[in-house]
Image (spheres, rainbow, N blue to C red):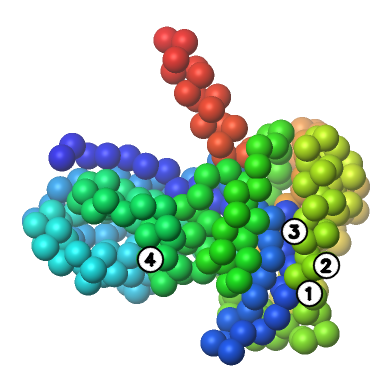
Amino acid sequence: MEKIKILAPAKINLILEVTGKRSDGYHDICSLVEKVNLTDEIEILKHEKHSIQFAGPWVIPEENTVKKTIDKLSQLFPDRAERYPLKIVITKHIPPGSGLGGASSDAAAILTACNKLWQLGLGQNDLINIGSTIGSDVPLFLTEGPCIIEGRGEIVHPAGTFPSLTFHLFVPEFQVSTKLIYDNLPSRLLSDLTSAHLRIKIFVSLWKENNIKQMEKFLFNKLEEVTRRIYPEVDRAIECLGDWCGKRFILSGSGGGIYALGTMDRVLLDRKPEIIRHWRHYKLESYYTCLQKEEEQHGNY
């Protein structure tokens, strides 16, 4: 096997509702999610034993979703795993603890790659069932395009085809704990599935029309209130960014990343407020639109 390279995209939650507390300790959610062209780069090649390496500015714990994926597949398919050990090198670009789903995306990419490399013959439902035991967001990254996710994330519905979106994302240097946020989510903030579906339906109709100004108004994250209370730096950044550029900024997921929808003035971006001067800034686009552009460009050569 030659060395193969794959990309694992980040995600942004356009609508994130929390609809209940489960008996297993997790929360039920209902979310409209888009994947974006901020990607981790993964290289896989033959090796004498399984090896996982991370490169990038962050320290990734030894117990991580990629290791969990390999361990799970080794348990399910011991002969294949023993016969074809892999060296996996992940160059991290998606900041951990940012609410962008980087760890789950890495796991989904490895799961998909091993299915092909080891010729496991797993179908989409098989992959999703395995992925859901690895991480709540893994099934999302096993499904192409914008998605609506429910349950704790394991129920995934493709949302359709929409115009490409542009985002400006800011991520702090510190990481936000997903567990801490959910543990401190008061029951008064829990919604119901009907309200969540209605909110998503309205947003989807605006997205189909590419009505960015109205879409900005309907961006929603139920976790934002508690995150801003626990992490005052995030609270101040959201307020400051809104005053700075006149756009609405919102929390990306269950992490510290905050984003605005649509383009921003380049001159304005050169004069960032002091509070976010050291935050990472990304200008992003819808992931699968970018892939299509690249495929069209290569096709013209």
Residue 281 seen in this snapshot:
no
Q: Is residue 214 left or right of residue 109?
A: right
> Please, which residue is most extreme toward the top here?
301
Question: Label 4 is placed on what type of residue?
Answer: Ile
**Residue receiving disc 3:** 15
Labels 2 & 4 near each other (Cβ < 8 A): no
Observer-side mark, 3 or 4, equals 4
Labels 3 & 4 near each other (Cβ < 8 A): no
The secondary structure type at the circle numbered 3 is: strand
**Residue receiving disc 1:** 192
**Residue receiving disc 4:** 130
Question: Label 3 is placed on what type of residue?
Answer: Ile
Labels 1 & 2 near each other (Cβ < 8 A): yes
Check residue 195 in the rendering and tell me which mark sits there, or answer none: 2
Instruction: Give percent across and percent down for residue 238.
Output: 81, 61
Question: Label 2 is placed on what type of residue?
Answer: Ser
Mark toward the start of the polypeptide (3 vs 4): 3
Are there few (<14), some (14-19), or many (20+) residues within 10 Å of tag 4? some
Observer-side mark, 2 or 3, equals 2
